[in-house]
Image: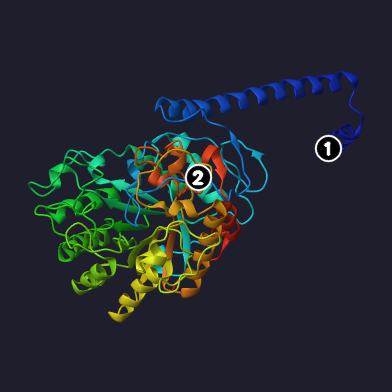
Amino acid sequence: MTSQNTARETMMPTPPRRRQQVRNFALIWSGITLMIGACTFISIYAATGIAANAKGNLAPVSISAKTTNPSDGADAAAIASTAGSSDATEAPDAAVAAVPTNTTEPTKVAATSAPDAAGGAPTATINPIKDTDFDLGIAVQDNPDPNVYKVWVDMAGKQLKLNWVKTQVVWRDVEAVKGKIDWTAMDVSIKMLHAANIKVLLAVAKAPNWARDKNAPTDKPGVLDGPPSNPQDYADFLTAILQRYPGMINAIEVWNEVNLDREWSTAPQQLDPARYVSLLKAAHDAIKAADPNVIVVTSALSPTGANNGVNYVDDFVYMDKLIKAGMLNYADCVGAHHNGLNVPPDADYKNIPERTPRAKYRGPWENPNHSWSFKSTIMGYADKVKAAGSNLKLCVTEFGWPTADGLTGNLRSGFEFVKDNTIVDQANFTELAITEMQQWGFVRLAIVFNLNYGAQAGWSLEGGVGDNVVWSILGKDFVAHPVWKKIEDRNFRGQPRKAS
């Protein structure tokens, strides 16, 4: 009887007094909702725009994700480096608050979390050590502010739909005093990425002064960094990281571009492949003892195209020496870099087709060398590994194409190739490189360089910071470059994975 009366009452028209109560409730609830939204906006702005402006190198932060038409003739300044990128972690860690969702129409969006879109979550969980099929990730610069870093995590996982994020750990900054480790940034990035079900690749390099060789040049951090005198110090540091974040780290790249004195300054100066292999062995043994499921990646080399034997060694020459010294015995994956230049990814260095319009930077055409070519370099590494009798695949821990479209200011002199690429070139070359690597079959993981280095540096091209800005796929004023949509459409996060 009670249930029948209740059912009947719910079917009857609402009395006038109750209708007024409902309207009042709706108005009050709407007001509360608007207040919460305003508070959220203010909090995000305070955590990002104000923090950014405090650095003195960012304009006020926008909440809009905007897009522009491709530019075919944007002025760009030169970039100075070898073909490999400089250490991007040196850039200021300012902040942003925008979430691009497309590259065709301006879209105003909130810089807060949103539910996973269709296909946004992995369909299955496979232990990464057993997953050797091609996968894609992106390099994301840390930010110790969790509100800001959450924006980057959402972009990588929910928007770009990627399974991996590479984050750099500068050892000399994190453990400036032996035994006293500053976990601030890693506590934010590693835990948040793990919670979002995004796999973590750590690139760990640059020994602190206390660990360096006696008389090593320690007064030029970022210019002449180097290895520890005792490899065990590095092994202990990696062990401490893995013990603090059990099961949260999926791969570790052991050092960076060891064929350059910029990364491997010793006393006396010597780019010694045997010494690197000693460091790799100590790191490998420590990593596997702490967590055997972590993928050990060898240091990617810089495609230098030159060789003076002291400050830089040709990467093919150095790769041969590393293999001879036993490198392949202490790794699960062979690291590689190629940061684009102005050559399409499917072009062999011996026969690079002329660009239309004609390329202004003529190095690849006038001085043929494998280092100009993504295809020649990456395939060359794979051939060397195979010739050594190994079945290890490559992990391309940095790749991408730079563009200065929409940017102003002056880069360091040296590599004017950036002037030749528009944002459309960046998109087309990156997409073609992904297709090539999938088809080759010997690339296990590839990391796009980069997501947010430009945003956190305020898209400045000054003071060397711009060296990394030109590779960012999130452009000035939070304009998502066309390459963003191409990556998003591939939906790596929604593709089923299988164990090998």
Horizontal and vertical percent for residue 196? 49, 48
Rate crowding at label 2 as few (under 14), some (14 to 19) or many (20 or more) other CA atoms within 10 Å.
Answer: some
Residues packed near mark 1 inside 10 Å, few (<14), some (14 to 19) or many (20 plus): few
How is the structure coloured here?
rainbow
Write the residue at 60% across / 42% down: 114
- Image-based side of 308 in relation to 399, left or right: left
Confirm or deny contact between disc 1 and disc 2 (CB under 8 A).
no
**Looking at the picture, does residue 78 appear above or below residue 397?**
above
Give the residue type that dot 2 points to.
Answer: Asp
Q: How many marks?
A: 2
Q: Place residue 393 in its image quadrant.
A: bottom left
- The numbered mark, 1 or 2, whose residue comes first in the sequence reads 1
Badge 2 element: loop
Residue 22 image offset from top left, x and y in percent: 80, 23
| Disc on res. 3 | 1
Instruction: Answer above or below: position of 154 versus 339.
Output: above
Mark 1 or 2: in front is 2
Residue at x 67% of width, y 24% of height: 34
Q: Residue at x 48, y 46 (%)?
A: 404
Q: Is residue 175 visible?
A: yes
- Residue that sits furthest to the right in the current view: 13
Q: Position of residue 136 (x, y in %)?
A: 48, 60
Q: Residue at x 54, y 52 (%)?
A: 422
Rendered location of residue 435, percent (x, y): 53, 68
Q: CA distance from mark 1 to mark 2?
A: 75 Å
Q: Residue at label 2?
A: 75
Q: Is residue 65 left or right of residue 223?
A: right
Viewer-nearest residue: 193 or 449: 449
Does any portion of residue 247 appear in the rendered image?
no
Residue type (three-letter) at the residue carrying disc 1: Ser
